[in-house]
């Protein structure tokens, strides 16, 4: 496969997720990073482009210039990754979609519902597509969970429980921590834990179960003094068809690093999965003892085997799951597909995630009232 030409906006020196995107893009040889606008300050951006081996003439002062100049080149980028703070996702994505350049955007897709609506309108008139990196959907055992639900192994889904617990924001906001600083600014983040990790939990629920949320109620709370956004959220979900769900996300739950868990209970059985032990999936058939499936093991389902790279017992993890998203997006782009397989997260799910945040904020402000999405 000829690698796709990749550009990046954000992800400069000291940034968190940009480096992860670059590793994920490299793992399967589907992309070559050739251009970027890596930081808000052009001098820092150019210095970092040099470190990454990006040519000087393809390191840009800002994303507007980058979109126009890359589009004008015969060897311009095919796709751009957006790894900036949330409030910039919408405007940057629109700039590249206007030039018919594909977009891989980190979550949440935008900081506000208005930005998300504007982006959907921009995508509708572009020849390019937008993809969202809800990377937890790339784990083999999550793919197996999705297949088990689709094949009816669990029966009718009755209850879904997802928790995403962290503790890295347990102390008062520290302006020296760049990642924490923009997340604490409602304008830049659009919300706290609910947007940062709530969107991952909500997306995972929909990805595995296929259930669509009809109404929800939410309590968003700020425990830490001086914080301007929520740091803890509890959400009850009513799905189409009558199933019930619950999500708890917190960034002040001391003792938790990235404790994302998912449990799904149906009429015939249940499954349980934990992100911190991602190579295992627990399944219990009604009336029988629990069974543990392992990634790469002889009993793994086809959906898990397809995205498994190495034999069972050698742990795979976060980077491989992230790389699976990059690989599948490359396949969609290369095949010029306009409809995506249900494993690829596109603008529809990105929009749904922003709508979820908006509904949670509306509900919480109204005293945990039930609201429609
Ligand atoms: N998928 C995941 O699990 C995951 C994990 C962490 C963060 N994220 C998301 O990734 C994004 C970045 O988060 P982070 O923690 O890496 O933040 P960060 O603060 O570490 O990095 C942000 C980068 O964007 C750059 N930037 C800011 N304004 C810019 C501009 N105008 N032009 C070019 N670059 C600009 C900054 O210089 C910095 O390099 C956020 O949207 C966040 O929600 C996703």
Image (tube, rainbow, N blue to C red):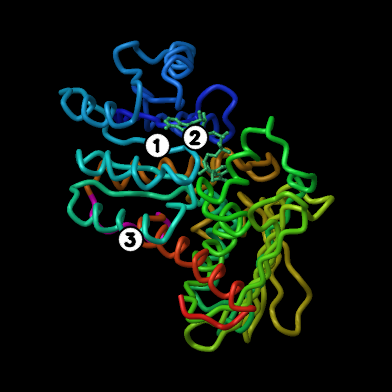
Q: For mark 3, give the secondary structure.
A: helix
Image position of 120 (left or right of 344): left
Q: Start and end of the magenta stretch?
A: 337-344
Q: Which residue is disc 1 drawn over?
A: 81
For ligand 1, tell me if the residue under mark 1 lies within 8 Å. Answer: no
Q: Which residue is disc 2 drawn over?
A: 21
Write down the quadrant of residue 70 in the picture: top left
Which quarter of the figure is the N terminus placed in? top left
Q: Are marks 3 and 2 in contact (CB under 8 Å)?
A: no
Q: Residue at x 49, y 12 (%)?
A: 51
In the picture, the disc for residue 117 is 3
Residue 211 image position (x, y, % from top left): 49, 76
Q: Could you give the CA–CA distance between mark 1 and mark 3, rounded to whole angstroms?
A: 20 Å
Q: For mark 1, give the secondary structure.
A: strand
Examine the rendered structure and indicate whether residue 190 appears above or below residue 62. Answer: below
Residue 191 image position (x, y, % from top left): 57, 55
Examine the rendered structure and indicate whether residue 351 appears above or below residue 110. Answer: below
Categorize mark 1 by other alpha carbons within 10 Å: few (<14), some (14-19), many (20+).
many
Residue 354 image position (x, y, % from top left): 46, 61
Q: Residue at x 43, y 65 (%)?
A: 352
> Is 33 in the magenta?
no
Image position of 163 (left or right of 91): right
Q: Earlier in the sequence, mark 3 or mark 2?
A: 2
Q: Residue furthest right?
A: 255
Q: For mark 2, give the secondary structure.
A: helix
Categorize mark 3 by other alpha carbons within 10 Å: few (<14), some (14-19), many (20+).
some
Write down the quadrant of residue 175 in the picture: top right
Q: Earlier in the sequence, mark 1 or mark 2?
A: 2
Q: Residue at x 47, y 72 (%)?
A: 210
Q: Are marks 1 and 3 in contact (CB under 8 Å)?
A: no
């Amino acid at each position: 496969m000829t690698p796709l030409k990749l550009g990046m906006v954000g992800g400069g020196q000291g940034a968190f997720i940009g480096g992860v995107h670059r590793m994920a893009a490299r793992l399967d040889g589907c992309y070559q990073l050739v251009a970027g606008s890596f930081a808000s300050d052009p001098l820092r951006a150019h210095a970092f482009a040099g470190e990454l081996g990006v040519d000087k003439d393809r390191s840009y002062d800002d994303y507007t210039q980058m979109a126009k100049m890359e589009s004008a080149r015969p060897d311009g980028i095919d796709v751009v990754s957006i790894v900036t703070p949330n409030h910039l996702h919408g405007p940057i994505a629109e700039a590249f979609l206007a030039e018919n350049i594909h977009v891989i955007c980190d979550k949440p897709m935008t900081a506000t519902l208005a930005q998300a609506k504007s982006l959907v309108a921009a995508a509708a008139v572009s020849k390019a597509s937008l993809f969202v990196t809800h990377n937890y959907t790339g784990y083999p055992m999550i793919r197996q969970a999705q297949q088990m639900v689709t094949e009816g192994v669990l029966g009718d889904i009755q209850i879904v429980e997802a928790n995403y617990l962290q503790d890295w924001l347990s102390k008062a906001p520290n302006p020296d921590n760049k990642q924490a600083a923009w997340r604490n600014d409602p304008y830049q983040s659009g919300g706290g834990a609910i947007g940062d990790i709530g969107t991952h939990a909500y997306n995972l629920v929909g990805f595995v179960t296929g259930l669509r949320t009809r109404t929800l109620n939410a309590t968003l709370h700020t425990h830490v003094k001086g914080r301007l956004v929520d740091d803890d959220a509890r959400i009850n979900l009513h799905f189409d068809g009558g199933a019930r769900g619950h999500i708890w996300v917190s960034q002040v739950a001391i003792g938790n690093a990235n404790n994302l868990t998912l449990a799904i209970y149906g009429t015939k059985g249940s499954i349980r999965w934990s992100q911190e032990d991602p190579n295992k999936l627990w399944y219990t058939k009604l009336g029988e003892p629990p069974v543990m499936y392992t990634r790469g093991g002889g009993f793994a389902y086809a959906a898990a085997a397809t995205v498994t790279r190495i034999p069972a017992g050698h742990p795979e993890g976060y980077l491989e799951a992230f790389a699976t998203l990059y690989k599948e997006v490359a396949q969609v782009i290369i095949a010029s597909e306009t409809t995506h397989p249900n494993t690829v997260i596109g603008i529809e799910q990105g929009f749904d995630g922003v709508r979820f945040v908006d509904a949670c904020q509306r509900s919480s402000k109204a005293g945990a009232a039930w609201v429609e999405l």
